Amino acid sequence: MAPALLELQQISKRFPGVVALDDVSLSVACGEVVGLIGENGAGKSTLMNVLGGVLQADAGTIRFGGRPVAIGSVAEAIALGIGFIHQELNVLDNLDAAGNVFLGREPVWCGPLRLINRRAIFSRAETYLARLGLDIAGSTPLGDLSLAHQQMVEIAKALSQDAKLIIMDEPTSSLTLSETDRLLATVRDLRSQGVSVIFISHRLAEVAQCADRVVVLRDGRNAGNLSRDEINHQAMVRLMVGRDLQDWYVHGAGRVQPGYFQVRGLRTRAHPRSEVSFDVGRGEVLGLAGLVGAGRSEVAQAIFGVDPPVAGEVLLDGRPVRIRHARDAINAGIYLVPEDRRKTGLITEMTVRENVTLPGLWRYTVAGWIRRAKETAAAAAQCEALRVKTPSTETQVLNLSGGTQQKVVLAKWLALAPKVLIFDEPTRGIDVGAKAEIYRLMRDLAAAGVAIVMISSDMEEVLGVSDRVAVMHEGSVTGILERAACTEEAIMHLAVGAGEGRAVR
């Protein structure tokens, strides 16, 4: 066995009222890929922040390269050879791609003037971008890139630091299938070059693909380890949640009212020449699949009135709905759970109570004054119904886990009795236990007569949750698959533009 590059021994970390890490140990050998998994709040990010110099442990020791080290800052971690790709993008969209890759380490020339060598920075950055299969110029403004491409730029930045150990915290959460495959291939290349990787992901299939060993955390403690030949979905889930999750994906068995929600000839600003048409039955979950850039999120935003459509119409229960802005959609009972919940789904500096009641605040006012007791009771009732894990409805949303934040987004819409609910990447960045709860919530909503549209880049999720699947390519729906015809091959066939316009049964 290769010698240990990293040894974290009996690491503990406490925050006011919370024990985040309790005697946690972890080792990584040279050239080894270790999958680090656990539910949100299990302590994964805290442990990695200790290793990356963002936080300092209250107790425990760190050995790196065979000697004890004290990592007091991010700069010290980088100097040791530790690179960190954070779950939340850590990029500057006012710089170009090369400027982000070499931020703070720009090559300079002209002696004491220390001018940035633009030719050198572009050339070097493009080398690392090409290594990830990203064919863009180093001079491309980051703001012009998709979320997925911005994530790849951040990965290129970590690679450019010649790290001995790279921590990847949910690196594929915004990537397409092809980009994910490229990243996993890069992980294998790094391993063959002797670089160690700690790979954190809630997508357990990816962990199974790339990990030599899996370490599981639960409630801030070590829950177990899995060797290469022990790694499988059920074993990982069992260690993460302490039990088997039965009926992971649940399909509808109730009656569906066809054509309840209809989109006809919708053209978005992103794809003004392409029309989108589909319908969703009352009590049905329609999956909306496609590659990144296919226009799925743009359709959701147009329906919800965030970015009004160029043309087209929306009908609800046979009646046209005119949507000029989000308030029109809300008044009609059409709600959107956005992809980036922290940026566009919540006001993270506000409390759970304030977020839950904000869209329907008029319900809790008298003569313009908010009735706090009524507002608090409504928020508490929604939190109890959705099993929102929060100390209080007065807790800031910023301090909640990703899965809990997603439930708060749901709570604010459920308080308004939705007729149509659009989920854009509903389980992005949340743990396996929370995923199972979100799927069950979606199915319960459908059973109650809500029409559900689910946009997802997770193929397993699309196949597991959807009653039917509409597939998009370059702004158009290329086909709609009935449940019996839903396979990964059929979806990918339509996602690349083949068989355009077909309904497959």
Image (spheres, grey):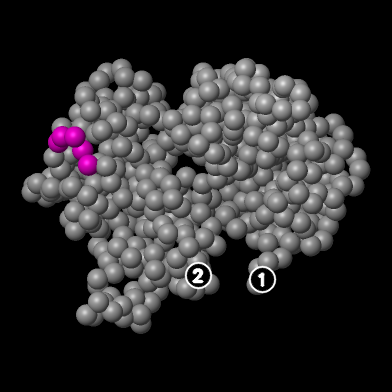
Number of the label disc, if any, that sits on residue 157 = none
Give the main secondary structure, helix, strand or loop, of the magenta stretch.
loop
Q: Is residue 146 above or below residue 315?
A: above
Q: Please give the residue where the numbered disc 1 appears in the rendered image.
A: 16
The image quarter in which residue 498 lies? top left
Camera-side residue of 481 and 273 = 273
Q: From this viewpoint, is residue 451 visible?
A: no
The image position of residue 351, as x and y in percent, is 45, 68
Furthest toward the front, the residue is 113
Furthest toward the left, the residue is 319
309 magenta-colored: yes
Mark closer to the chain start, 2 or 1:
1
**Quadrant of the frame with the C terminus:** top left
**Quadrant of the frame with the N terminus:** top right
The image quarter in which residue 103 lies? top right
Packing grade of label 2 (10 A; few <14, some 14-19, many >=20) is some
Furthest toward the right, the residue is 67
Packing grade of label 1 (10 A; few <14, some 14-19, many >=20) is few
Q: CA distance from mark 2 to mark 1?
A: 14 Å
The image position of residue 127, as x and y in percent, is 63, 18
Q: Are marks 2 and 1 in contact (CB under 8 Å)?
A: no
Residue drawn at x 34%, y 29% is: 294
111 magenta-colored: no
Residues drawn in magenta: 308-312
Q: Please give the residue where the numbered disc 2 appears in the rendered image.
A: 395
Q: Is residue 129 above or below residue 168?
A: above
Camera-side residue of 296 and 489 = 296
Camera-side residue of 121 and 65 = 121
Residue drawn at x 13%, y 47% is: 322
The image position of residue 111, as x and y in percent, is 76, 24
Q: Is residue 154 above or below residue 131?
A: below
Q: Mark 2: which amino acid?
A: Thr
